[in-house]
Image (cartoon, grey):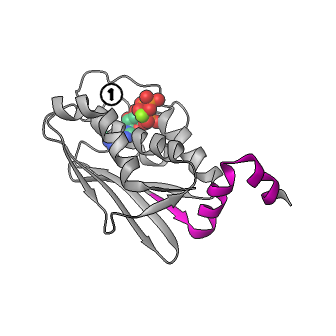
Amino acid sequence: KPFRIRSCIQDVLERLESMISSQEATIKVEMPDEELSLNGDRFYWTQVLFNLVENALKQNPRKGLKVTIGCTRNDGGTTLWVSDDGIGIPSNDLPHIFRRFYRVEKHHSQEEIKGTGLGLSIVKRAIEAHGGSIRVTSIPGEDTRFTIEIPKDAEKLIGLETSPENHEQASA
Ligand code: ATP
Ligand code: MG
């Protein structure tokens, strides 16, 4: 069933509150329409956004990171993005970043950052399983951006995914 994307983002920010405040990060939410909603499993989308925002903060432990979470809707569907102005992802690594266990080799001279390298692979598989797509671009220090596209048709699919009775309808 439909849920407000805004409330989903709010949950993510609450869960990351201590990281955000200790890093003095600035979070900007760009949403033309506060009512903007998605069809489907709210928990699932919260996890997806959590992973992306957590990555941005975790990879950039310095103070004053800027993170933008955005969302727009047009006739084709919904676009969500998470971007940051941190160290970014070297272009050599970009094609592999969604692979399981893949992590960028010791980001510059920073101390080791913890993680399994699974977050993005799970995010990608989940989005694709629901008919959506995710891509990444990176201009280090300026804009590292994960963009999710959810076509209109896929939204219906996601909606169907959530309840067993709808599964029956889907296979009928
Ligand atoms: P996990 O998510 O399982 O805790 P992880 O964060 O290391 O571990 P992924 O979320 O899959 O794994 O990310 C893979 C790698 O991509 C990260 O280790 C990091 O090197 C790089 N990365 C992801 N997001 C960013 C970002 N916003 N800025 C810079 N590097 C990033
Ligand atoms: Mg991660």
Q: Which residue is mark 1?
A: 106
> Helix, strand or loop at disc 1?
loop
Q: Residue at x 45, y 61 (%)?
A: 37
Q: Write the start and end of the magenta stretch as one range.
A: 148-170
Extreme residue toward the right, this view: 172
Above-or-below relation of 83 to 20: below
Which residue corresponds to the image point at 49% horizontal and 47% vertical from the top-left? Answer: 45
Quadrant housing the N terminus: bottom right
Disc 1 CB within 8 Å of nearest ligand 1 atom = no
Tell me the crowding category of disc 1: few under 14, some 14 to 19, or many 20 or more residues within 10 angstroms, Cα based: few
Q: Which quadrant would the C terminus be assigned to in this image?
A: bottom right
* Image: 151 above or below 69: below
Residue furthest bottom in the image: 75
61 shown above or below 43 = above
* Residue 148 position within the rendered picture, expressed as x and y whole percent measured from the top left: 47, 57
Q: In front here: 105 or 150?
A: 150
Q: Residue at x 57, y 58 (%)?
A: 132
In the image, residue 69 sits, relative to residue 118, either above or below, namely below
- In the displayed structure image, the side of residue 158 where residue 60 appears, left or right: left
Magenta span dominant secondary structure = helix
**Quadrant of res 5:** bottom left
* Place of residue 22 in the rendered image (x, y in percent of width and height, measured from the top left): 17, 29
The magenta stretch spans residue 127: no
